[in-house]
Image (cartoon, rainbow, N blue to C red):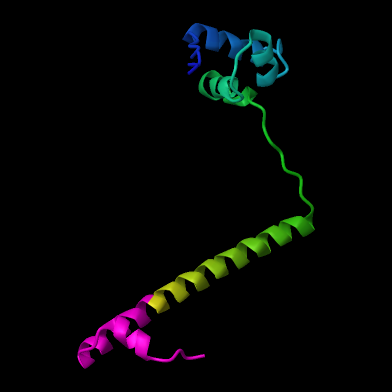
Amino acid sequence: MKLGINTRYSEAFKMQVVQEIENGRHSGAHAASKTYGIKGNNTVKGWLRRYGDPGKLPKQIKVMSMKEIDETAELKKRVKALEKALADAYMGGLLNESYLEIACEDMGMDIETFKKNTPPIY
């Protein structure tokens, strides 16, 4: 069985790498990782989030047409309506199960026996 080697980096080294990225010495986290042989896809990215200047972190800009914005809004509304319908159906099922328990209790019958002896309703 082969054990992996766990590399620990000093705080000073982490801050140095972050500063070099912010000053433009490296084009980004991936380039700095390659330069220093830092393993792990998100190691340097984590350092940037932790030690970096938020104003200098790369930003993601999403460009969308009005049609895409409208479609996204409509899909969000639809998801919300479907989630509500699902929650209502779940609550209805729980209510029905509770009513069945009460009815079986009133009849002095076991629920499983009632389910076995009652034909399904379509």
Q: Position of residue 58 (x, y in %)?
A: 67, 28
Q: Quadrant of residue 78?
A: bottom right
- Residue 116, compared with residue 40, is above or below; it is below
In magenta segment, residue 111: yes
On screen, residue 7 above or below 117? above
Q: Nearer the viewer, residue 66 or 84?
A: 84
Is 93 colored magenta in this rendering?
Answer: no
Q: Nearer the viewer, residue 8 or 105?
A: 105
Task: Pinpoint residue 31: horizontal percent, then vertical percent.
Answer: 70, 16
Q: Is residue 97 left or right of residue 6?
A: left
What residue sits 56% from the left and 21% below the top?
43
- Asked if 109 appears above or below 95 in the picture, the reply is below
Q: Position of residue 65 (x, y in %)?
A: 79, 53
Give the tally of numbered discs: 0
Magenta residue span: 94-122
Q: Name the residue rendered at 37%, 82% in the picture.
A: 96
Displayed quadrant of residue 76: bottom right
Q: Is residue 41 left or right of residue 9?
A: right
Q: Main secondary structure of the magenta part?
A: helix
> Residue 3: image x %, image y %?
48, 16
Outermost residue, front direction?
1
Q: Is residue 71 above or below residue 94?
A: above
